[in-house]
Amino acid sequence: MLPASSIASTAASLPASAPTSSPSPGSAATVAPLRQSLAPNGAGTGLFTTRSFMPGEVVLHIAEPLVAVPDEKHIRECCSGCLKWKPGDKEGGNGDGGRQLKYPDPEEQEERLMKCTGCNIVRYCGKTCQKYDWRRAHRHECPVFAKLQPRVLPASVRACIRLLLLRKYGELKGESGNTVWRGILRLRGHEEGHVESEKKREMIPLMAKAAQTYSGTAESEELVRGLYCKTLVNTFSIAAPNGTETIGNLFDPYAALFNHSCEPNCTLEFSGKEVFVVALRDVKEGEEARIAYVDVEGVDVEKRRKELAERWFFDCECGRCKTEMRKKGGGGGGWGA
């Protein structure tokens, strides 16, 4: 599983300790400081440390996540190559009548986003990002976006389309790519949980069918529907540097292995599409690295557990939840006082 909680950061706030980079997209090699193993309490596979970490130390750095896309609201003010956010970029053409920068920055104002002349939808901060994204997948999705514009597909559908395009044309070929693809298919999608919601029961087949049609994949409708559910459950929402809004979706099968705790020992920080997993406290060798999928500070335990059950389909059994449920007099899950 993977959190979709929004955790803001800026490059300036990142720890000075040297990060450990993840495998590049298409590679399934294990990152040295972390190992995969079964987690307790039926949490599936988790990531465990192979050495100790101090507070503020970078446990994992994912420089090139498998898929990162701006959301619908920010697609015209985010670079689709590096996911850096340039709010209210007038010259770059954000399609809103040239509103003023919400968070003025003289240096940012000098950097204008360039739109793709093929689809007139996605934007880039320069030729390097444009060429990178074109080679990676945009050359295949550009004609689709052009036909649909000015409409923009939901970020969840575009992320699923990217995965299918990478499988069909790009990064997920060869033995290493096949290994990554198998890892994606092993992730939990909780289709049975999704169908219990009337809204999702109607929405998911439509979204999955759109991803299947627009990607031109040869994969079956059943597989694509399962893949779409996996992206819903195992996706990060990337927060803007100001921390007040989310700007995109990020999916990476290795990062998806981080499990939840309401007493996390690690947190996530973003710089554009780059992901940094940072230790919050001393983490012992052999300890599972866990993050919080939801806001935990100042949030009632029943509210936390309800959100986790509705969005990630599990009942949290961490020590904090047990203690707080006992104090409320509700043992939940057999936690009697």
Image: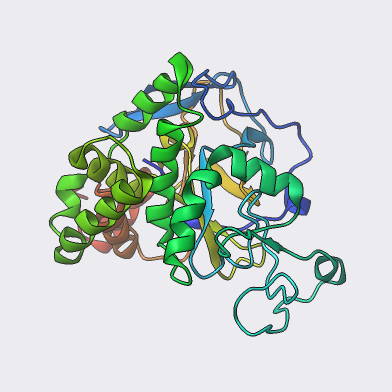
At x 61% / y 44%, what residue is drawn?
133
Q: Nearer the viewer, residue 29 or 151?
A: 151
Q: Nearer the viewer, residue 327 or 126?
A: 126
Can you see residue 253? no
- Location of residue 205 in the rendering, given as x and y in whole percent from the top left corner: 20, 54
- Location of residue 215 in the rendering, given as x and y in whole percent from the top left corner: 37, 45
Q: Is residue 17 above or below residue 214?
A: above
Can you see residue 212? yes
Q: State how many labels appear.
A: 0
At x 25% / y 47%, what residue is drawn?
314
At x 50% / y 31%, what residue is drawn?
170
Instruction: Kindly indicate the quadrant of the structure image that contains residue 157.
Output: bottom left
Residue farthest toward the top in the current orientation of the protein:
175
207 sits to left or right of 166: left
Instruction: Kindly indicate the quadrant of the structure image that contains residue 119.
Output: bottom right
- Location of residue 36 in the rendering, given as x and y in whole percent from the top left corner: 43, 22
Q: Nearer the viewer, residue 85 or 275?
A: 85
At x 70% / y 79%, what residue is drawn?
102
Q: Is residue 269 above or below residue 303?
A: above
- Location of residue 176 in the rendering, given as x and y in whole percent from the top left corner: 47, 17
* Quarter in which the N terminus is drawn: top left
Rendering colour mode: rainbow
Q: Nearer the viewer, residue 143 or 5?
A: 143
